[in-house]
Image (cartoon, rainbow, N blue to C red):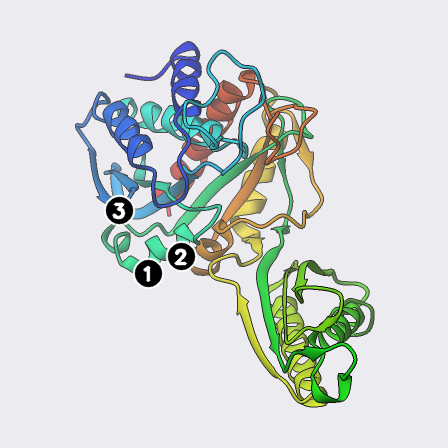
């Protein structure tokens, strides 16, 4: 069966009601499998890994495999959209539009279960994009090995684009991210006797201040990088010198090389401050699988050319964004392309009010089935 637009909208609404946090998407996985099992299985098989579901279609030519990935997790956000199909899971919401992502993937999959693809296809319904580098975990588990794609595609919905608009660019689409967790530990004491203590408020303040010099003095101004420290916790009361300071933040950069440079400078600054203040520092720089989403030049050229030359598609070349996405890890291992699908909302991703326009779903399905058909026809002739 090829899913119709109305069927896809109904599926999206069902998925929207059952958001689950990363690696806990048990109900979502059950729902996905129930839909997949209704599809023509003549050349379809699937397997699971934790809450991931991987579907493989045997193509007419089995010498090449094209991958398509969707994320499936929700966020710890209390929904305030007022929709009749709002989340049934208290304190959880598909506030990043992964319900739209899954629905488009199911629409594409249903098409190719009825019209056998020219080459193999692997569809990846991936958990934990938001919180636990699910793409990296899945890849390193070895689950994909026998069905490993030779190239791979994915999209993210974009509230800032009109519904159904396809946006893409050569090079980096999303930044790579890295979490900063720094704990400075010294000796607390009475405010009247500073010489008997070791003030971690001051040490932490120096760390916060010196971090600001990284982008202004270590990053090439032609390139991009962001360092934000959003949490500082130290001390217990006004007349006690703090013996510990906890500081948390994030690094964002458009290339992995730049991300690693910024990480190196953060570490050097933290260690130098610890030496200067004669205290200890515990620094955790956690990047996980959130590499920059760097589009492959060949697949992206093919993708953009197809979208620009197809009259049913509205295409826009987009600028890079400093948002993070763990599809970047998969693109560091497998050449491919990520793109935007417009969903036209006045509210941003992760907002409790986000309500993507559903007419984007079928437009996304049609654009991608058309592109993948064209791409696989070309690959089968090589």
The x and y percentages for residue 80 are 58, 22
Give the residue displayed 43% in from the left and 34% down from the top: 372
Q: Are marks 2 and 1 in contact (CB under 8 Å)?
A: yes
Residue linked to disc 3: 50
Give the residue displayed 79% in from the left and 70% down from the top: 209
The x and y percentages for residue 48 are 23, 43
Residue linked to disc 2: 136
Name the one closer to the observer, 297 or 329. 329
Seen in the picture, residue 29 relative to 285 is either above or below; the reply is above
Give the residue displayed 51% in from the left and 26% down from the top: 364
Question: Going from the N terminus, do you reach mark 2 or mark 3 first?
Answer: 3
Q: Could you tell me which secondary element the residue under label 3 belongs to?
A: loop
The answer to whether one can see residue 102 in this image is: yes
Q: Could you tell me which secondary element the residue under label 2 belongs to?
A: helix
Residue linked to disc 1: 140
- Relative to 361, 30 lies left or right: left
> Within 10 angstroms of label 2, few (less than 14), some, or many (20 or more) residues?
many
Q: Are marks 3 and 1 in contact (CB under 8 Å)?
A: no
Name the one closer to the observer, 261 or 63. 261
> Within 10 angstroms of label 1, few (less than 14), some, or many (20 or more) residues?
few
Give the residue displayed 52% in from the left and 56% down from the top: 290
* Residue 351: image tag: none
Name the one closer to the observer, 117 or 190. 190
């Amino acid at each position: 069966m090829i899913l119709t637009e109305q069927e896809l909208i109904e599926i999206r609404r069902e998925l929207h009601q059952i958001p689950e946090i990363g690696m806990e998407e048990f109900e979502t996985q059950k729902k996905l499998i129930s839909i997949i099992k209704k599809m023509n299985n003549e050349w379809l098989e699937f397997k699971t890994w934790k809450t991931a579901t991987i579907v493989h279609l045997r193509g007419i030519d089995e010498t090449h495999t094209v991958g398509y990935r969707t994320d499936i997790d929700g966020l710890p956000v209390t929904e305030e959209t007022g929709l009749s199909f709002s989340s049934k899971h208290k304190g959880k919401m598909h506030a990043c539009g992964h319900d739209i992502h899954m629905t488009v993937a199911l629409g594409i999959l249903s098409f190719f279960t009825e019209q056998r693809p020219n080459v193999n296809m692997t569809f990846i319904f991936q958990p934990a994009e938001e919180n636990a580098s699910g793409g990296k975990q899945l890849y390193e588990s070895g689950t994909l090995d026998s069905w490993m794609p030779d190239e791979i595609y994915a999209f993210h919905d974009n509230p800032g684009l009109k519904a159904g608009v396809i946006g893409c660019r050569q090079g980096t689409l999303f930044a790579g991210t890295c979490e900063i967790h720094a704990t400075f530990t010294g000796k607390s004491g009475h405010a009247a006797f500073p010489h008997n203590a070791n003030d971690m408020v001051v040490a932490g303040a120096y760390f916060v201040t010196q971090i600001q010099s990284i982008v202004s003095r270590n990053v090439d101004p032609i390139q991009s990088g962001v360092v934000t420290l959003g949490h500082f916790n130290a001390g217990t009361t006004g007349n006690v010198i703090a013996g510990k300071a906890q500081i948390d933040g994030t690094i964002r950069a458009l290339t992995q090389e730049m991300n690693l440079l910024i990480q190196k400078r953060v570490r050097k600054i933290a260690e130098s401050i610890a030496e200067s203040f004669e205290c200890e520092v515990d620094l955790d720089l956690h990047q996980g699988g959130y590499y920059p989403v760097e589009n492959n030049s060949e697949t992206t050229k093919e993708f953009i050319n197809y979208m620009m030359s197809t009259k049913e598609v509205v295409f826009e070349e987009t600028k890079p964004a400093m948002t993070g996405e763990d599809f970047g890890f998969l693109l560091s291992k497998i050449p491919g392309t990520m793109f935007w699908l417009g969903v036209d909302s006045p509210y941003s991703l992760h907002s409790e009010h986000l309500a993507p326009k559903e007419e984007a779903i079928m437009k996304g399905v049609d654009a991608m089935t058309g592109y993948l058909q064209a791409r696989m026809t070309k690959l089968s002739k090589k």
